Amino acid sequence: MTTVDPTDAPSAPASDTLAILGLGLIGGSLMRAASAAGWRVYGYNRSAETVSSALDEGFDAGADLADVVERAAADDALIVLATPVTALDEVIPVVHGQAPDCAVTDVISVKQQVARAMARHAPGQRYVGGHPMAGTAQSGWAAGQTDLFTRAVWAIATDDSADPATWARVARLALDVGSDVIPVASDEHDRAVAAISHLPHLTAAVTAAVGAGDGDLALHLAAGSFRDGTRVAATAPELQRAMLEANRMALLNSLSETIDRLVAARDELRDRGSVETLINDGHRARLRWEELSAAQPRPISGVQIGSPGWQAQLRAQALDGRVWTGQQTA
Amino acid sequence: MTTVDPTDAPSAPASDTLAILGLGLIGGSLMRAASAAGWRVYGYNRSAETVSSALDEGFDAGADLADVVERAAADDALIVLATPVTALDEVIPVVHGQAPDCAVTDVISVKQQVARAMARHAPGQRYVGGHPMAGTAQSGWAAGQTDLFTRAVWAIATDDSADPATWARVARLALDVGSDVIPVASDEHDRAVAAISHLPHLTAAVTAAVGAGDGDLALHLAAGSFRDGTRVAATAPELQRAMLEANRMALLNSLSETIDRLVAARDELRDRGSVETLINDGHRARLRWEELSAAQPRPISGVQIGSPGWQAQLRAQALDGRVWTGQQTA
């Protein structure tokens, strides 16, 4: 049984090593944030231009994947998969080939598909998935921000099979860069993210497409509701597709519910001249979110990482709205 | 034939009188903005609390509709209907009873229904509708902002029957508070606004409702795409309903197109694992909007307000992306 050293609190200086594979918006922001938090950090990106930008800014990066992974193996670094999900079938075999003993995490927006790719290409390797709920409509290294994860929520896959030492190391990384940790089962994560992160890309896209369909005059008249409601549609299409298509089953459920609700709203508007049900449901949901966002997060308490059933205990407290802050005593 | 005096440019100080009926977010902001621009302004609100807030801030307001309208008649003020559309059947008869010779405009988000209410309760009264494309998720006097209309777009109903002197007066008001004027036919306005302003309320509502349907855990994980995509769902439901339900036919068309596109996206995702069509269409539409928003607006030119066919000439140039700036020479 592995327990967490109480000195692993976020206030203690970090001294771990991080190898980030993929230096786009998320990976690049993590390079900046983890460096600032005291981690030793280096990374890989397939684009020589990105690598050269990172080097110019004083970071440590290379464009040779095998080299970076070999170095991670020598340092026993925590490896972070930060590529689009579509690149995993190329990246993970190199990780498993060169650094089979390294612990691995990721910052990708789906958890089940990454776990399946790890099981396929890196059987037996220590892996605990993660997903920082942060981003902008921009992409690429240049869009990265040191404070992207400050006060964000970082979901960590907390399935019954999760390795406690790896879990604690990933949690420390998230806490060190300023996030609150939410422990969640992989399938539960994917369902929730379909509803609150992937579906909004489809509703933004359809809002933009229907608005523009009425011609430039309509777009000239567009103001705040259009601007905010379509913001994420500005994200590079290939990145949106990689995210959404990797979460197909859960997204299909959310999308079907969306269609059902809109059809009901259309019938109500046509037959009774009213949009009451949908407007009221949406208003109530938004206010609930504002209330939750404004509330001080309550810490998970009384769980010792590595004790029997710790994963289920963390998940249960997270379902109750609590977060892991790393300062818990068992 | 009325022509516009070239000295009526926005740089000339305004000295006209404005009577604003309804001092919520839009009416209250207009009271502040038009006062700042040199107009003599007073207003009516049915809530004594709102009136007292306005008085406390040094504005001129009353809670007796007939009194305020009588005063407008004595001053030959431009009367602005700024109540929810649902109050028009009560307000317009008072306007027509006490001030039948006053010119009337409005700042309500639909044009055909207001024009119908004017024709019903105030036959023959001079009326040119308007719609400033500005707002926030807040409502009420306290949410008002002096600069709400700065760099906004103000649609002015420019039907073939529009009275040129009233049109010019409404346009000057819009220009004086910092907006660009877009001349548009009432039916065209309502179609465009259904697509780019009213539909986003329904897509925001459904995005919020489906997201919250997955429970508080999902809402805890919600980040930027949810926050921005659901912002307008925070608006008071009765205000959203008044807006949307007043534009029923046009909104039904936009909503049906939305459903059709989402059904096609669901089929594509289910059958081919792809969301390419919708994501690409949405991305292209958003970029087109960003391009139009960033461009310097080109002025309408060569139209003399009041000359034969001036309304159609203005509309045609607006369809071509041009705006009325008030400084045009004929």
Image (cartoon, coloured by chain):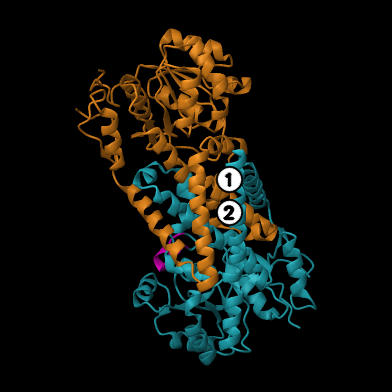
Chain colours: A cyan, B orange
- Label 2 vs label 1: CA separation? 9 Å
Q: Is residue B152 left or right of residue A271?
A: left
B304 is within the stretch colored magenta: no
Magenta segment: A137-145
| Front-lying residue, A328 or B154 | B154
Task: Provide the major secondary structure of the magenta segment.
Answer: loop
Identify the residue at image location x=69%, y=79%: A162
Q: Position of residue A105 (x, y in %)?
A: 58, 77
Q: Secondary structure at mark 2?
A: helix
| Front-lying residue, A38 or B93 | B93
Q: Secondary structure at mark 1?
A: helix
Say which residue label 2 marks: B207
| Front-lying residue, A107 or B81 | B81
Q: Position of residue B79 (x, y in %)?
A: 45, 19
Q: Are marks 2 and 1 in contact (CB under 8 Å)?
A: yes
Dots 2 and 1 on the same chain: yes
Q: Amino acid at mark 2?
A: Thr
Q: Amino acid at mark 1?
A: Ala
Say which residue label 1 marks: B233
Q: Position of residue A231 (x, y in %)?
A: 46, 54
Identify the residue at image location x=35%, y=43%: A217
Q: Quadrant of the N terminus of chain A?
A: bottom right
Q: Is residue B168 above or below residue A103?
A: above
Q: Position of residue B316 (x, y in %)?
A: 28, 38
Lower sequence index among marks 2 and 1: 2
Chain under numbered label 1 = B
